[in-house]
Image (spheres, rainbow, N blue to C red):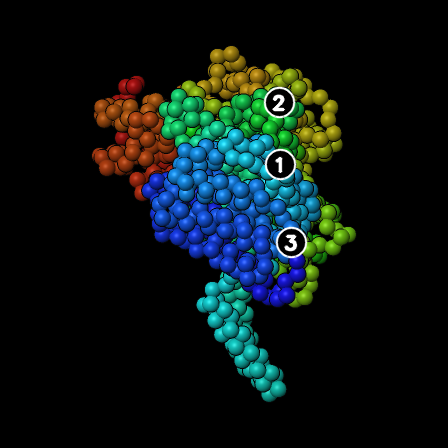
Amino acid sequence: MAIEDPELLAEFIAESRDHLSHVEGQLLEIEANGADIDVDLVNNVFRGIHSIKGAAGFLGLVTVNRLAHGLENILGLMRTRELTPNSAMVDVMLRAADALAHLVNNAEASNDANVDDHVMRLDAIFTNAEGGAVAVVTATCTAVAEEEQHELDLDSAVDFVEQAMFDEAADDAAHPTAHAELEPAQMPIEAAAPPAPTVIDEPKSTASATPTAQAPTAVAESSIRVQVGVLDSLMNLAGELVLGRNQLIQALNTDAHVGIEAVASRLDQVTTELQEAIMRTRMQPIGAVFSKFPRVVRDLSAKLGKQCDVVMDGKEVDVDKTILEAIGDPLTHLVRNSIDHGVERPDVRVAAGKPAIGTIHLKAYHEAGKVRIDIADDGGGIYPEKLKKKAIEKGVITAEQAGRMTDREAVRLIFHPGFSTAEKITDVSGRGVGMDVVRTNIEKLGGTVDVDSNPGHGTTIQITLPLTLAIIPSLIIQSGDERFAIPQVNISELVRLRREEMAKRLDLVKSAEVLRLRGSLLPLVRLREVLGFGLPSIATTEDDSQATTNIIVVESGQQRFGIVVDALHDSEEIVVKPLGRHIKNAPCLSGATILGDGHVALILDVAGIAAHEQIGSAHETVSTSKGEETVHGDGDSQSVLLFTNHPLDHFAVSMDIVARIERIRADQIDSVGGQELVQYRESSVPLLRLENIISARPTEPQNWVYVIVFAIGGKEVGLIAPRLEDIRRVPTNVDTITFQEPGIQGSLTISEHTTRLVDLFQIAEIAHAEWFADQPKPNVEEGKKPLVLLAEDSTFFRKQVKSMVEERGYEVVDCEDGLLAWERLMEGDLEVDVVITDIEMPNLNGFELCQRIKQSKWSYLPVIALTSLAGASDMQRGIEVGIDDYQIKMDREKLLAALHNFTGAKAGSSRRHLQPA
């Protein structure tokens, strides 16, 4: 059918879409109200449908007019309270409204559509209601609903959505906005007719089976609604821009350089305001997507025999139109997953002490310049052990990998391609093409998705999205001779290492370079290496005394790592352009932009770099292992470096005293007078081998070895470690009985291997006693050694500290808690010279013990805090309570030097009497 006036038809379509956009939510509200009919609400729906019917009749859209008339008849009875709505009745109306929306979107071909099925069902409700046959109306609607449950519309819609998402994920990730601009494939409006219902006669011809609410894929609209105030602002700014242009032309003609600077400043301001105003025209409330989920939840929960409510917060949060159109399908899939996999059946919920009705909570909000969307359910949650077992069965991970996984990492297995937690394959779930496609689509938008689950209580999916894709704030960096852009949304922080810091903060773990950053290890990649620009030497050249290393700490999904670059430039707001076909498949690039100076800069894809460099596995090596061991016993722990001297000999050293780790070629080791050495930065570092000092198997020949570097009296010493295993936090309940040997502090069982804990200082002293000959000794007056009061709740650390201090010539009274130390001091029979205390203790911590001492008659006593807890806030609190010094627990050299400084010539001068605690 050809409409003579296309503009009139376009106006009809726009107005009808506006009316129908609210109908679904209003019908659901009518259903929820039941017999308590809100006449004003029904009137609103009636007026919208009536307007569509009238305009359709004027334009000759007979089928639209006919279907709208059927809906109008039922709404008319409801608003006069002659008909009480119920769920089955509203279900028929919803399906008719879906069909009406489809007809409006295809108005020119609408007269050829067959809506007899919908019209007859509506007429049956109307006729029976007018005759007062309420029971017949209910029976009719129920029969129709049961039949339609068996039809293809819901099932085919599900297949359509998931297949569309799967196909889209396979497209080029470099064009996140491209899909929103394509016309989606249309689903058929016709489907095979169901068997005739038992209450009313149904036609045997084909019936309309319009897609339900969850079926349609997001359509890129060619028009958008903009507030008048925004248009007024655009007009004003356009005027300012014209004024600025005229001023610039005048200044150029008169060579007034001062005037040019002023005009340029004004143009910069106006351009920024204009950009912000234009961006506001593209911003749309996320409620436009949220509004379809009450219907999705209603229909799917009924299909699955569950009861579910949906709660929505933050519908007013604005996002870019392109993003809004692209997140519809991923969010729909997540909501469906929450109902299918999350919310339990009513009988199961009641048995678990929960309300029979489950809740899906959708929440949108702004956070740190981004949009966060949380999809939470109060269902059964995800059980990590079950996921691990299923992942092992499917070959997704190995049993060894599962053993190393934390619960949080196990839950994230749901994002693995082809992995499904469904027990059986249905039209709703089980095909394994869901969550990984959701993640792919979200990441294509520059966003991230994560999951958090509490077994038995529910699951939350967390999505983070940029506000817009059109203009992206980015940091311009340089690698080699080329400049690149990194979106600021991915940047966590910038780290610049001076030359003297590199040795202490850059390490190698399992051949992967890592950065020590606030007590954790951060995987590093070098952009030169990623892009194949050629690699300069890792070691800084001697003539470059001002050399620094620039590290950009980035985040993408669950990955967090550092990118080493040659130089940092300014931040710029860049306009993203797609890559050409010759490089569009580059895994580490997402687009290109033109910089202010006219040069082209490629945009780095942080997620792509993480995947290309396998950051996930490197990150797992560091983070998983650190959290793997559970701290038992004393409740304290320490970070250790694990290595093997021989494949059958496992050792560990405390990370607190490791200065750095070097990887060297075996042929770089020299031997002079029986002492092995390695040249490092124009100095010689003496090397130790465990097999020459303690009971250990000889190392096997290797081309490369690691050297664990530590310091003795200001001089660096290295321990040869043929193979590094890991860095872990381990409990301090060390077995000190099984292995009693000088240089060995005890043993632990780590990953089913007996691992000996090496005392680096003691093995150095065994090998070279002369290195310790000039170590400072305590000043002993009248045969009385300086007295140290030690408070430490960890048995292992207490024994180790006491032993090392006594070996140096001090006397130690040790207490296993701060409260016991205070009580021992209060007894008054000790002439203490210095107090050493742990910070974290159960009954009286180190801060509290120090505070009591400094507020008592013993306020003159120096207090040394011995701990690995030495962050800025803790040190500030320590200063406030009077702690005189902080020392690392296992760093013997620095602890003994501090003791010597605090005792000195006064040690023992005021002591009179000592009784053991």
Q: Earlier in the sequence, mark 2 or mark 3?
A: 3
Identify residue for label 1. Answer: 204
**Residue sitting at 54 percent across and 65 percent down?**
278
The answer to whether residue 775 of the structure is visible from this angle is no
- The front one of 371 and 861 is 371
Q: Is residue 856 above or below residue 823?
A: below
Q: Residues within 10 Å of mark 3 (few under 14, many from 20)?
A: some
Taking the spot 55% from the left edge, 35% from the top edge, the residue there is: 201
* Viewer-closest of 169 and 24: 24
Q: Amino acid at mark 3?
A: Ala
Q: Which residue is mark 3?
A: 109
What residue does disc 2 label?
392
Neighbour tally class for label 1: few under 14, some 14-19, many 20 plus, Cα within 10 Å:
few
The image quarter containing residue 635 is: top left
Which quarter of the image is occupied by the N terminus?
Answer: bottom right
Q: Are marks 2 and 1 in contact (CB under 8 Å)?
A: no
Residue 687 appears left or right of 495: right
Q: Name the residue located 48 percent from the left edge and 28 percent from the top edge.
A: 305
Q: Is residue 806 above or below residue 554?
A: above
